[in-house]
């Protein structure tokens, strides 16, 4: 994967402008992956083969992230947004608009497909790019009003509970 990433970054750096690129988080942040492993354990099955597959995917992700870091290093107009570390930091939860959110199933940061972000999750993700742009380019792009986004997010836990979804426990 490294040669392909290097080629892509070589081409991107020749364009006029500053480019901010996110790395990839670990697979284990995806609620469905956690749930699949739990199902195996609850069924009394040995999860070691599953764990080996997850470890292999995480190793490939780490290799990609390292290839990305190495590929952008020579180019001052290419910048990494450390999404992997951000996901690790918020995995235990964050509070937005007074409501605790997590990356758990129905936790408010990950959508119903257990893969993509909710509106609030995307607002938090976008804010990481804004922070990186401001820090790197010394700009003053105003922050996203994440509380306002969350107030309108159809998948906010409080809203799903209010809509009658009993699978969303109050926190």
Image (spheres, rainbow, N blue to C red):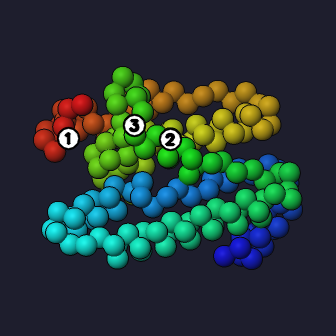
Is the Cβ of the residue at disc 2 closer than 8 Å to that at disc 3? no
Q: Nearer the viewer, mark 1 or mark 2?
A: 2
Marks 3 and 1 in Cβ contact (< 8 Å): no
Q: The C terminus is located in which quarter?
A: top left
Q: Residue under circle 2?
A: 89
**Residue 143: image location, x then y, percent:** 60, 28
For mark 1, give the secondary structure: loop
Q: Position of residue 79 (x, y in %)?
A: 75, 50
Horizontally, residue 32 falls left or right of residue 117, namely left
Category of crowding for the residue at label 3, using alpha-carbon neighbours closer than 10 angstroms: few (below 14), some (14–19), many (at least 20): some
State the residue position of label 3: 93
Q: For the point 38% across and 69% down, which residue is it?
A: 51
Q: Residue at x 64, y 42 (%)?
A: 129
- In x, y percent, where is residue 8? 75, 69
Q: Quadrant of residue 39?
A: bottom left
Secondary structure of residue under mark 2? helix
Q: Quote the CA–CA distance across marks 1 and 2.
A: 23 Å
**Secondary structure of residue under mark 3:** loop
As measured in the structure, the alpha-carbon distance from the residue carrying label 2 to the one carrying label 3 is: 8 Å
Residue beneath label 1, please? 168
């Amino acid at each position: 994967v490294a040669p392909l990433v290097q080629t892509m970054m070589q081409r991107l750096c020749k364009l006029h402008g500053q480019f901010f690129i996110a790395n990839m988080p670990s697979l284990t942040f995806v609620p469905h992956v956690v749930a699949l492993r739990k199902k195996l354990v609850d069924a009394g099955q040995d999860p070691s083969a599953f764990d080996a597959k997850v470890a292999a995917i995480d190793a490939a992700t780490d290799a990609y992230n390292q290839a990305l870091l190495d590929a952008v290093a020579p180019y001052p107009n290419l910048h990494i947004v450390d999404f992997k570390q951000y996901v690790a930091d918020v995995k235990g939860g964050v509070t937005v608009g007074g409501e605790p959110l997590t990356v758990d199933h129905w936790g408010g940061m990950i959508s119903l497909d257990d893969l993509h972000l909710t509106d609030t999750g995307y607002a938090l993700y976008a804010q990481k790019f804004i922070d990186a742009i401001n820090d790197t380019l010394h700009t003053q792009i105003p922050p996203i009003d994440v509380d306002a986004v969350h107030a309108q997010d159809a998948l906010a836990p409080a809203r799903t509970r209010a809509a009658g979804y009993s699978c969303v426990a109050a926190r």
